[in-house]
Image: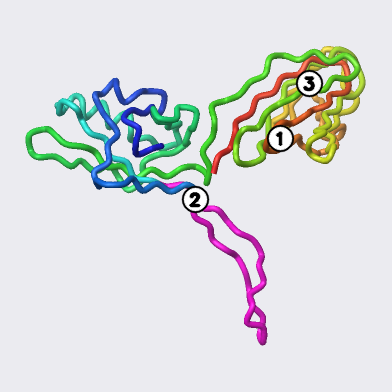
Amino acid sequence: MIKESLYFSFAGRRSTEFGINNVSISGGLFNEQLTSGKSITEFTVRGNPKPYFVETKRDPKQFQLHFFFNEGWNDNLINEVVRWLDVDYYEPLFFSEDIDRVFYCLPIDGIEQIHNGLKQGYLTLNFRCNSPFSYSHEQVTPWIEVDGSKVIEIDNLGHHSTLPDIWIESDKSGSISFFNLTDQNTEMRLDNLQTNEQLYIDCENEILETNLENVYRHDDFNENYLTLVYGKNHIKIVGKAKVKFSYRYIFS
């Protein structure tokens, strides 16, 4: 998917703006890593040759790319490209053959320029991602009105479970619950909400915010953040409110 793509977008700008193509210089078949590497944590005890497994840790994705200048370059173009690529924080990168797969990455080891002395050639970059995964673009539902009870369906088309962001606008005082009927009927519950209260829940980073001053909702929360498992998630919402979800698919 990466090596066969001619064009790409990085940090909100497309390679076509600079007359750059993504190319392979090895020839023959493409070699691409489907999943990131893993390391195993384990320990041994005296007298037992079999180690005890503790956990596995996934390494952040890394890959090398070569960007070719279709019509050569001049100093102004090189300076503009350096300002574009030489970032200090992870930026979104996606490729023309699969624009729905996004990597959050930055170049490491410096940017190497390979040329023939006539201002023709390519750049070589080693990218490191912020995680072992790639992601979809953001998926956002419309506002959903709930008055009593409603079951909605949210698709997770990635390889792994994902944790959404949720916005809640309470229409009356009381409680609101989210049951994932697909995930063993697990419940996320908030109590003591006030009429017209607005809440934001970041399930991945375990952030819970309200628009009410001097109110901290963690005491009214069961601390069970909603998870969207792979496939179709049937979410039962109980309460009286408007809710909206935002999430990304996670790919190996």
Q: Which mark is residue 95?
A: none
Q: Position of residue 5 (x, y in %)?
A: 35, 32
Where does the image place residue 231, in percent across and percent down from the top left? 68, 34
* 3D distance between C-alphas at marks 1 and 3: 31 Å
Question: Badge 1: how crowded within 10 Å, few (<14), some, or many (20+)?
Answer: many
Q: What type is the residue that disc 3 sits on? A: Glu
Question: At label 1, which amino acid type do we have?
Answer: Leu
Helix, strand or loop at mark 3: loop
Identify which residue is drawn at 60% across, 30% down.
Answer: 248
Name which quarter of the figure residue 230 lies in.
top right
Q: Residue furthest left?
A: 118
Which sits earlier in the primary sequence, circle 1 or circle 2? 2
- State whether residue 182 is above or below residue 126: above
Magenta region: which residues?
37-62
Task: Please say if 46 is above or below 121.
Answer: below
- In the rendered structure, the answer to whether residue 22 lies left or right of residue 97 reads left
- Return the residue nearer the eye: 80 or 219: 80
Vertically, is 64 above or below 53?
A: above
Residue at x 32%, y 48% (from the top left corner): 109
Q: Label 1, secondary structure: give it.
A: loop
Task: Work out whether residue 23 or residue 74 is closer to the camera in this orientation and state it.
Answer: 23
Circle 2 residue: 36
Left or right: where does residue 27 sit relative to residue 56? left
Q: Which residue is mark 1?
A: 228
Task: Give the distance between the C-alpha atoms of the residues marked 2 and 3, in whole angstroms.
Answer: 44 Å
Name the kind of residue labelled 2 in the image.
Answer: Ser
Identify which residue is drawn at 7% across, 38% down: 117
Label 2 neighbour load within 10 Å: few <14, some 14-19, many 20+ = some
